Image (cartoon, grey):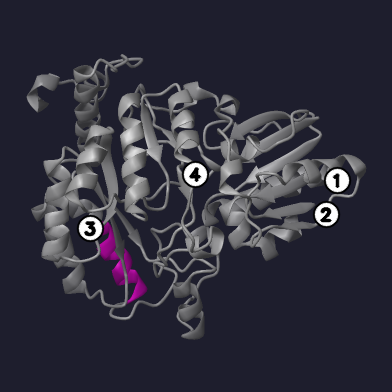
Amino acid sequence: MKFRLIYPRWPKLERQTEFHLPPHGPVVFAAALPDYVEVEFIDENLEAINFDDPVDFVGISMMLTIQAGRGWEIADTYRKRGVKVIFGGISTMLHAEETINHADSVFIGEAEGRMEKVFADFRDGTLQKVYDYLDDRPPIETVGTARRDILNRDLYHYRGVQMVDLVHASRGCRFHCYPCAVAYLGGRKFRPRPIDKAIAEMESIDNNRLFIVDNSLAQDTEWEMDLFREMIPLKKKWCSHPIEDRPEVLDLAAQAGAWYVYQAVFDTSDYIKERIKRYHANGIGVEGTILLGLDNHTEDYIKRLIDFLLEIELDMAEFTVLTPFPHTKVFDDFVQQKRIFSYNWNDYSADKVVYYPKHMSPERLEELFHYAWDTFYKDEPQEFKMFKLLQQVSRREKEDNTYRPRRRDLASQAYGRDTRLLS
């Protein structure tokens, strides 16, 4: 059976340097497919879909809300040609009721142990409209190594440098952050994979640079430290979401190859300032993730926040505006308060304002969003800051003899300057 798995295209943030990571959801899903299924993967961000190429069954994996509209278009095209389409992924779960109108089947939940039935139903002509396993999560021990063999690895480079591979060591999140849908999608219980399985998967990846995509590694101190101890011999270099702010944890993370973290910067407190210092003291870079437009954000507050980011010397920053995604607390609150003025999911890109902020107009918040990007990167452009992070990891790889020359010299390609200036 020929199964075509498609990842719909989506626009990057307006001010963000464009690069593409190998997607995680599709390769994890592919690992759960029956052996008799021949999988062809198309990342539409980098490859065109040939709708005339014959296929038995189509799957559409959507991670982001802004992929939904395009995903529905793709499905409509195939279904007009008599090809059945099944949807899955995070965005499918958030927009299931609308997605059903464009699908022969919608899969909700985690795929492990469930695909044999789905594909047997397809072969028998009894494909169900909805497979709902949202509240029936498979044992975490059944999560296997993702099928990265379905990826065209040559596509995932930035200026000749291979992008990180994505891997996860846990699911679920015990935190319930206000704008986040993880509590709905993965549950509020932290579910760590057996460490030996997570380590085996990391070791199997033919890439020295990884992105550990867990919602937060800072959920169970003992597990987190055990994971880092086991990662040390791998000599991988990796980035992740927050690491627990304890000296012994940060020290182990650094030994395990922590390259940089995505750290939410939610205020201008000394706690945040000192936390960034502790990351840096352990040789760990920081890309701040800054959400603008919360109800306590005035214009003056946002401007002070940008000044603070420059003061604490973040390595990079990614700015987004608050976006009320379905199945979040902010969505429920804003619906009740009648503050959402757009339900056009193409606008839910985290760089457009779709609600009425408390202290300013939507237009003014968008202006401040642009101000944040422009001000933070005024003296050093985003690409240059990214280059310095890449140079940092290259130096560390050379120190432990894991450096692999990339396809071409990033420095001379991108900047035409002597890289010793940045040593």
State if disc 2 and disc 4 touch (CB < 8 Å): no
- Given residues 291 and 72, the one toward you in this image is 291
Badge 3 density bin: few <14, some 14–19, many ≥20, Cα 10 Å:
many
**Quadrant hosting residue 292:** bottom left
Disc 1 element? helix
Residue 51 visible, this angle:
no
- Given residues 142 and 300, the one toward you in this image is 142
Front position among marks 3 and 4: 4
Front position among marks 1 and 3: 1
CA gap, disc 2 to disc 3?
47 Å
State if disc 1 and disc 2 touch (CB < 8 Å): yes
**Quadrant hosting residue 255:** top left
Which amino acid does the dot numbered 1 rest on?
Answer: Asp
Disc tally is 4
- Given residues 92 and 343, the one toward you in this image is 92
Horizontally, is 4 left or right of 397 in the view? right
- Residue at coordinates 57% horizontally, 54% vertically from top-left? 90
Q: What stretch is highlighted in magenta?
A: 361-371
Residue 362, magenta (yes or no) = yes
Q: Is residue 359 above or below residue 48?
A: below
**Residue at image mark 3:** 372
Which amino acid does the dot numbered 3 rest on?
Answer: Ala
CA gap, disc 2 to disc 1?
7 Å
CA gap, disc 3 to disc 4?
38 Å
CA gap, disc 1 to disc 3?
51 Å
State if disc 4 and disc 3 touch (CB < 8 Å): no
Q: Which of marks 1 and 4 is nearer the N terminus?
A: 1
Residue 376, magenta (yes or no) = no
Which amino acid does the dot numbered 4 rest on?
Answer: Arg
**Residue at image mark 4:** 193
Q: Earlier in the sequence, mark 2 or mark 1?
A: 1
